Image (cartoon, rainbow, N blue to C red):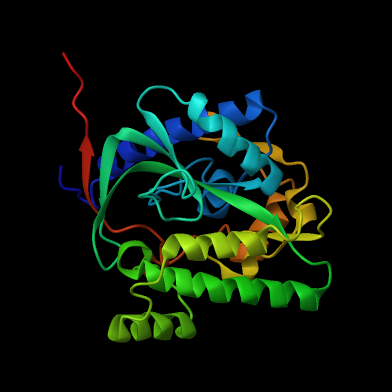
């Protein structure tokens, strides 16, 4: 059916689909003693709304690299029927660096990019990587990896770069316009660039690092986080579930959002441009 952004019941139906994916993910992690944390708008929603931010249409979690790599080896054998796992090293047609668990029975047409794409309802899973101990080394490492991330995004610009994200700094808007005008990056090998990026990310182990980061998160240098904010994690209510998040939720959310209890203006609400949601019909 065509998606009506003013119909909260349609968004709520999608949120409940994603919530079930999160339940499956968390149960796998608990069963195998894997660390994970709610991050981004998901963690913000857990604290400010005890669940989804009312206009949110996805969920984000992050895993320390050692746990993430173990998760990659076990998840496919743990998923119920109707769900699948996507990872660029395991799926030829999937070119995002972070992984996803998807509900194959729900298709979402996402028009946030230059070209509308049809994806299954998803839960995003990001790896968290270590960084050098000194501030200078951390910054050099971050911007070197970010430079390669730019080439990667240019290589799949039409399909995967969200043009609707609010609050982009001027330099990002200029880079996006540059790519639109020049078509820079067309013909670059996205998968080869991801492998190069991963080589950089694996240089510094998560355990033993004072700061960690998620390169493909949305918040640029704010993605560099003192590992003590994550700690061993705590459980927080999220809708009908109890999910794990950073140990120091207040400091974590202030780091990303400042006054996080104040909702943003309508123009600053970050969401995808969903134009259609299709649910597989159940057999009678």
* Residue nearest the observer in this picture, 50 or 18: 18
* Residue nearest the observer in this picture, 238 or 283: 283
Q: How many marks?
A: 0
Along the horizontal axis of the image, is 34 left or right of 283? right
Q: Is 82 rendered above or below residue 59? A: above
Q: Residue at x 72, y 41 (%)?
A: 233
In the rendered image, residue 115, in percent from the top left (x then y), is placed at 24, 64
Which quarter of the rendering shows the C terminus? top left
Q: Residue at x 77, y 41 (%)?
A: 232
In the rendered image, residue 12, in percent from the top left (x then y), is placed at 33, 39
In the rendered image, residue 144, in percent from the top left (x then y), is placed at 63, 76
Q: Residue at x 57, y 30 (%)?
A: 74
In the rendered image, residue 90, in percent from the top left (x then y), is placed at 47, 43
Q: Is residue 36 among what the camera can see?
A: no
Along the horizontal axis of the image, is 26 left or right of 76? right
Q: Is 228 rendered above or below residue 283? A: below
């Amino acid at each position: 059916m065509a998606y009506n952004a003013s119909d909260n019941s349609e968004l709520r139906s999608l949120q409940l689909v994603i919530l079930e994916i999160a339940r499956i993910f968390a149960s796998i992690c608990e069963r195998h003693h894997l660390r994970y944390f709610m991050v981004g708008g998901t963690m913000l929603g857990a604290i400010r709304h005890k669940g989804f931010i009312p206009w949110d249409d996805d969920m984000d979690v992050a895993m320390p690299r050692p746990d993430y790599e173990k998760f990659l080896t076990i998840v496919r054998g743990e998923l119920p029927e109707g769900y699948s796992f996507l990872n660029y090293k395991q799926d030829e047609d999937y070119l995002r660096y972070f992984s996803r668990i998807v509900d194959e029975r729900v298709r979402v047409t996402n028009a946030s990019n230059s070209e509308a794409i049809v994806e299954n309802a998803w839960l995003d899973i990001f790896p968290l990587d270590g960084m050098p101990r000194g501030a200078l080394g951390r910054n050099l490492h971050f911007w070197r990896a970010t430079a390669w991330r730019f080439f990667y995004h240019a290589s799949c610009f039409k399909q995967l770069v969200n043009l609707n994200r609010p609050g982009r700094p001027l330099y990002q808007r200029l880079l996006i316009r540059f790519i639109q005008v020049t078509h820079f990056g067309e013909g670059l090998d996205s998968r080869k660039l991801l492998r190069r990026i991963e080589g950089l990310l694996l240089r510094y182990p998560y355990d033993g690092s004072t700061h960690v980061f998620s390169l493909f998160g949305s918040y640029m240098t704010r993605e560099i986080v003192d590992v003590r904010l994550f700690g061993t994690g705590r459980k927080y209510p999220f809708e009908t579930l109890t999910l794990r998040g950073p140990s120091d939720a207040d400091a974590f959310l202030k780091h990303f959002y400042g006054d996080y209890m104040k909702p943003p203006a309508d123009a600053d609400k970050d969401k995808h441009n969903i134009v259609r949601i299709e649910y597989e019909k159940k057999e009678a």
